[in-house]
């Protein structure tokens, strides 16, 4: 029996905009088990981003329970939530969110700065290791503006790996990238998943969702369908099939 | 939370925005610099006035005729004839706190030699006067006792008089000048003393035996002032009291009647001018303090802008595990680092300004440790105070709002 990383029961989230109450999430029940690679899908306004914010401990549900790695999030105060994000979660954003004028290595080190148990030598080693995992070890001293979009996203992925989280939460991580680069990023995600990382990946692109093991489709604040992907894409294979482009490498 | 890590984060954040950091510090630099500069200039001018007053004489005390009351009518000071040579003799005999005493009578007139003439004041004094007033002889000698007793027509001239009626080629000693129709033989020349604290030329004078001026020039029997030196600075107050007691008994004034003379000391003048220049220093310091405050507001302003500008960064830091306190501390440490570095540069800047200004104004250059310490503490406090509010604003941001901020 696999360990349950995320367990959501009867979760609700309401927003009050003036006098109108928006039911962003109505009644969500879901589980993500260790080693899973789940796509959280849906159109804009379906509640998938709200779900990700709650899963990421950035927002609190109005009602219902959310257990992250066995910890009930409702019982946590702000500081404990920050600690949870620091030790159990890895975030990847659509727009990378790297600190400007800061080297790749220092960007990757960032989460460890907020963990006082990690000494500076260990911090450096772990950040270098994470960069190796995403294949950017030789670019560690580059600033974000010296890296391509795909490389910046790899740095962001390395940053999400550096604290060895129980789950990686990705929010439209390929949204800003072209097809080939998206596939390369998905290849990296598949590899990480093969190595045992649990990943929840928010996307609205169906072809991206097909790289994952499971698709959870949101609609109007409810889970519409939940299915296992049968003909799963293999990123390495797909990249090989892409038409050969003239390589413009700066 | 680990403060070493937070400090590193803060330093890195400042490093990424050096230009903004320098702009932020500028206000503090100017504020601290002007506080130190102004106080140093103020203190320098105070000391310069004090030293000029002390140049006027050595523990000098002087008595002048005071206002008198005749049947309820107050008489003015200038016409009073209350001081006499008997008072001088009595002081010389009885006073224990006085080392030197000289009477003074003076009048103004035209000094003439050949085809040159110059308006100046002649002071009738004795030989001790030079020491009391800190005049020194450059050439020649002072009057002898015998010359005083015999109403000799001799004089000692100041440098301004020398320049104007002798020029540079003639040795004044041994020459004769005419003053108000009376020929005076020059027996000595005074060293240059320069202007006093009030801008008066202390070299524009002629000294002659008091007897000669009193009888030959003024034809009076009283004297206009008594100059004396207290034996030490500390005995100045005692000396004033002693002079008052002795002259009162000389003038046979009953208890309860007002003095018909006034005694003033150099120490009093020092304290008067010191209080004036203290006020000046305080005024300068207050103006500089305002610029320090404005500098602090500058820090707050830029920290505020920086919180807004860095909202996304704050969101990111929160999403990777920074809690509100961490963000608060980071911004606070940034503000404190800025104000401390700004403070140190400001101190150097202030010292430079005061060194230059005191050089130009030819004042003594004084490093005021208190002002440095004070302005340093004030600017650290300003850093904390004005950094706190923007930092709190940053810390209270909702992580999702912050990370989604564009």
Image: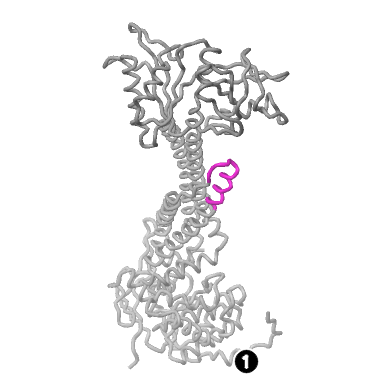
Residue B82 at x, y = what percent?
40, 14
The residue closer to the viewer here, B173 or A125, is: B173
Which element carries disc 1, helix, strand or loop?
Answer: helix
Numbered-mark total: 1
Question: Relative to residue B267, is residue B66 depicted above or below?
Answer: above
Q: Which chain hosts label 1?
A: A
Residue B395 at x, y = what percent?
40, 62
Residue A220 at x, y = what percent?
41, 71
Q: Is residue A84 left or right of residue B58?
A: left
Membership of B360 in magenta stretch: yes
- The boundaries of the magenta stretch are B349-364
Looking at this rendering, what residue extends furthest in the front direction? B146
Quarter of the rendering occupied by the N terminus of chain B? bottom left
Q: Is residue B174 left or right of residue A10?
A: right
Residue A200 at x, y = what percent?
43, 81
Question: Relative to residue B140, is residue A31 depicted above or below?
Answer: below
Residue that numbered label 1 is attached to = A240
The residue closer to the viewer here, A182 or A139, is: A139
Looking at this rendering, what residue extends furthest in the top direction? B71
Neighbourhood count class around disc 1 (C-alpha, 10 Å): few under 14, some 14–19, many 20 upward: few
């Amino acid at each position: 029996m696999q360990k349950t990383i995320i367990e959501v029961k009867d979760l609700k989230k309401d927003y009050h905009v003036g006098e109108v109450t928006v039911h962003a999430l109505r009644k969500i029940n879901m589980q993500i088990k260790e080693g899973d690679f789940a796509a959280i899908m849906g159109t804009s306004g379906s509640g998938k981003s709200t779900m990700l914010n709650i899963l990421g401990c950035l927002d609190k549900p109005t009602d219902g329970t959310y257990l992250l790695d066995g910890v009930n999030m409702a019982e946590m105060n702000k500081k404990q939530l920050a600690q949870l994000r620091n030790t159990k979660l890895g975030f990847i954003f659509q727009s990378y969110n790297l600190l400007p004028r800061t080297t790749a290595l220092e960007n990757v080190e960032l989460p460890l700065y907020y963990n006082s148990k990690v000494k500076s030598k260990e911090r450096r080693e772990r950040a270098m290791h994470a960069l190796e995992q995403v294949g950017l070890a030789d670019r560690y001293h580059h600033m974000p503006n010296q890296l391509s979009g795909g490389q910046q996203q790899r740095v962001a992925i390395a940053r999400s790996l550096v604290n060895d989280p129980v789950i990686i939460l990705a929010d439209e991580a390929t949204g800003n990238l072209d097809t080939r680069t998206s596939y390369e990023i998905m290849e990296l995600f598949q590899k990480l998943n093969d190595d045992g990382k649990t990943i929840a990946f928010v996307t609205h692109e169906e072809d991206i969702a097909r790289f994952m093991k499971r698709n959870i489709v949101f609609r109007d604040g409810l889970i519409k369908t939940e299915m296992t992907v049968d003909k799963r894409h293999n990123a390495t294979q797909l990249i090989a099939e892409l038409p050969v482009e003239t390589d413009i490498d700066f | 939370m680990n403060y070493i890590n937070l400090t590193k984060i803060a330093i890195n954040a400042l490093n990424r925005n050096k230009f903004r950091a320098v702009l932020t510090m500028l206000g503090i630099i100017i504020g601290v610099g002007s506080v130190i500069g102004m106080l140093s200039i103020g203190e320098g001018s105070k000391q310069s006035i004090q030293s000029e007053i002390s140049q006027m004489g050595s523990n000098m005390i002087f008595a002048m005729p005071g206002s008198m009351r005749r049947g309820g009518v107050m008489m003015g000071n200038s016409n009073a004839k209350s001081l006499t040579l008997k008072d001088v003799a009595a002081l010389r005999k009885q006073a224990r706190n006085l080392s030197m005493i000289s009477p003074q009578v003076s009048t103004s007139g035209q000094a003439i030699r050949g085809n040159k003439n110059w308006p100046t004041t002649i002071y009738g004094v004795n030989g001790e006067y030079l020491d009391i007033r800190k005049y020194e002889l450059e050439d020649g000698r002072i009057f002898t006792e015998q010359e005083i007793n015999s109403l000799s027509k001799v004089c000692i001239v100041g440098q301004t008089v020398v320049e104007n009626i002798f020029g540079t080629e003639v040795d004044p000693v041994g020459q004769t000048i005419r003053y108000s129709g009376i020929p005076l033989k020059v027996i000595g020349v005074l060293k240059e003393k320069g202007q006093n604290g009030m801008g008066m030329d202390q070299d524009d004078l002629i000294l002659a035996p008091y007897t000669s001026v009193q009888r030959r020039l003024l034809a009076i029997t009283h004297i206009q002032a008594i100059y004396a030196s207290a034996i030490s600075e500390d005995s100045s107050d005692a000396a004033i009291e002693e002079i008052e007691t002795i002259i009162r008994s000389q003038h046979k004034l009953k208890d309860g009647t007002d003095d018909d003379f006034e005694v003033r000391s150099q120490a009093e003048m020092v304290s008067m001018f010191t209080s004036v220049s203290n006020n000046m220093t305080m005024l300068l310091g207050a103006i500089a303090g305002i610029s320090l405050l404005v500098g602090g507001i500058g820090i707050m302003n830029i920290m505020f802008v920086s919180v807004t500008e860095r909202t996304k960064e704050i969101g990111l830091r929160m999403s990777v595990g920074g809690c509100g306190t961490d963000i608060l501390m980071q911004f606070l440490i940034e503000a404190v680092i800025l104000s401390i570095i700004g403070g140190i540069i400001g101190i150097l800047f202030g010292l430079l300004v005061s060194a230059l200004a005191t050089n130009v104004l030819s004042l003594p250059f004084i490093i005021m440790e208190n002002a440095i310490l004070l302005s340093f503490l004030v600017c650290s406090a300003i850093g904390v105070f004005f950094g706190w509010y923007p930092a709190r604003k940053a810390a209270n941001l909702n992580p999702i709002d912050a990370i989604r901020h564009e």
